[in-house]
Image (cartoon, rainbow, N blue to C red):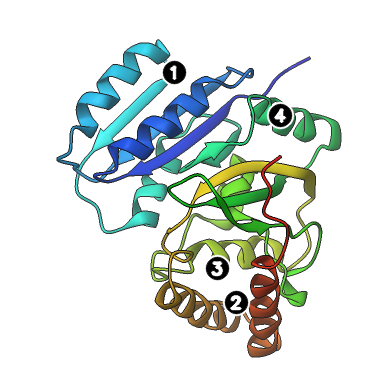
Amino acid sequence: MHKPKISIITVTYNDKVHLKMTLDSLMSQTFTDYESIVVDGASEDGTIELLREYKEKMKGRMRFISEKDDGLYFAVNKGIEMAEGEIVGILFDRYANVEVLQKIVDTFEHTKCDVVHGDLFYLNEQGKAVRYWHMGEGRIQDGWMAGHPTLYVKMEVYKTYGVYNTIYRGGADYEFEVRIFKDGKLKISYIPEVLIYMFYGGTSSGNFKGYRRSFAEGVEALRALEVAHPVWINVKRVFIVIKQFFRRRELP
């Protein structure tokens, strides 16, 4: 049976410690038919030397570039342009276990879907869970949003709907999900388990200012994409996110 190749895109800038953890996590996966694409924003902390080391370890499965860019999703879009896989995932963090990629591939095969997602834990620097993302199945119109770090998408989806809109600095991931999910045409499969341990403190998850910008951009995105009742949808999304902080925080 044909096993689809996966392109794993990692974006980094002066974050060698976390990058090493991410690449080690990728290399630990039992499914190995992937390519690792790392887009570095011209780091000066030894990242390039680390990438050269891991490129050798991966024996032809890694490609990387290092150059200045205009932000996170500019870099992600570069990675998508470089990708050669049938499925694309974005990995800034760590997999929850060594079987995650295999489970994702199996889900694509068995359900013939366009998109796969699951749950995730946000971890602090001490490795303690501070937030548990569990959305399950749902609709954008109800305030639902798939956990973006767990999102694996067929390349055909990017070709049909486009890549990330870099007008949005903190909410490009949400705008992308609204764009591809709002019309209900894609088949989405949910894996009901934790797939990712996320380093807490990303563009929209690290502080109140980041949340405020993300939610404000969410309303802008809903309006721009002509989704009815954008403010009400965003209010529901706020309450869903708040509830995440009161869910269980024990790692499996």
Secondary element type, mark 1: loop
Circle 4: residue type: Val
Of callouts 1 and 3, the N-terminal one: 1
Disc 2 crowd rating (10 Å Cα; few below 14, some 14-19, many 20+) is: some
Q: Residue at x 71, y 86 (%)?
A: 228
Q: Which residue is mark 1?
A: 61
Circle 2: residue type: Leu
Q: Which residue is mark 2?
A: 225
Disc 1 crowd rating (10 Å Cα; few below 14, some 14-19, many 20+) is: some
Q: Which numbered circle lies on residue 175? A: 3
Q: Residue at x 45, y 76 (%)?
A: 208
Q: Using the numbered discs, state the Cα–Cα distance from disc 2 to disc 3 in whole angstroms.
A: 9 Å
Disc 4 crowd rating (10 Å Cα; few below 14, some 14-19, many 20+) is: some
Secondary element type, mark 3: helix
Is residue 227 visible in the rendered image? The answer is no
Name the spot of residue 169 as percent of width and height, x first.
Answer: 39, 68
